[in-house]
Amino acid sequence: MKLKITFITLMILFINLEIAGQDTALIGVWKGTSICQVKNSPCHNEIAVYHISKTSKPQILSMLMNKLVNNQEEEMGTTDYSYDQLHHTLNSINDRPGAHWEFKIRGDSMHGTLIYNNSLYRIIQLRRIRDRSQ
């Protein structure tokens, strides 16, 4: 019986470490394009530089979303995201009403969308340029 409990405890620990490692692997700097999809809007096409970091909450990551202006990063805001390990996606949480950001992660690339007021507002394509160790 003790061996069974020890085995189960070790499996739970291993699974928790594996889950924690999944979102930690996203930490770093990602760069690419953020292209507007709504004509005649205040939206402008941008070169995006997003900085992903951990928060104190499990499975929640913070993304500082910047754009490049004259080769300098200009801060646009920070949003927290929940990480769905099964689907490899980040989804915005506690964001302003009517806006939903979603990013699908495939290795060192990320494809994102911003749905705003039920319309596709932006398409974002990013590649990792620095990971958490740099």
Image (tube, rainbow, N blue to C red):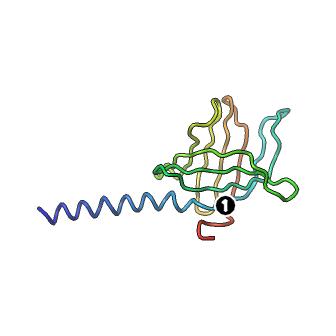
At label 1, the amino acid type is Val
Residue that appears at 52% across and 60% down:
24
* Image quarter of the N terminus: bottom left
Task: Count up the numbered dots.
Answer: 1
Q: Residue at image x 65%, y 51%?
A: 111
- Outermost residue on the front side: it is 56
Q: In which image quadrant can residue 71 be found?
A: bottom right
Q: Is residue 101 above or below residue 74?
A: above
User: What percent of the width, then of the height, locates residue 94?
Assistant: 57, 37
Q: Is residue 56 above or below residue 113?
A: below
Q: State the residue in front, 46 or 68.
A: 68
The residue labelled by disc 1 is 29
Quadrant of the drawing holding the C terminus: bottom right
> In this image, 75 relative to 61: left or right?
right
For the point 30% across and 58% down, the residue is 12
Residue 19 located left or right of residue 104: left
Q: Position of residue 25 (x, y in %)?
A: 54, 62
- Answer with left or right where residue 21 lies relative to residue 115: left
Q: Residues within 10 Å of mark 1 (few under 14, many from 20)?
A: many
Q: Is residue 85 above or below residue 14?
A: above
- Residue at image position (44%, 58%) is 20
* Residue that sits furthest to the bottom in the current view: 134
- Residue 66 point in image, percent of width and height: 74, 51
Q: Secondary structure at mark 1?
A: strand
x then y, percent, for residue 129: 69, 65
> Most extreme residue toward the left, as rendered?
1
Residue 47, placed above or below residue 100: below
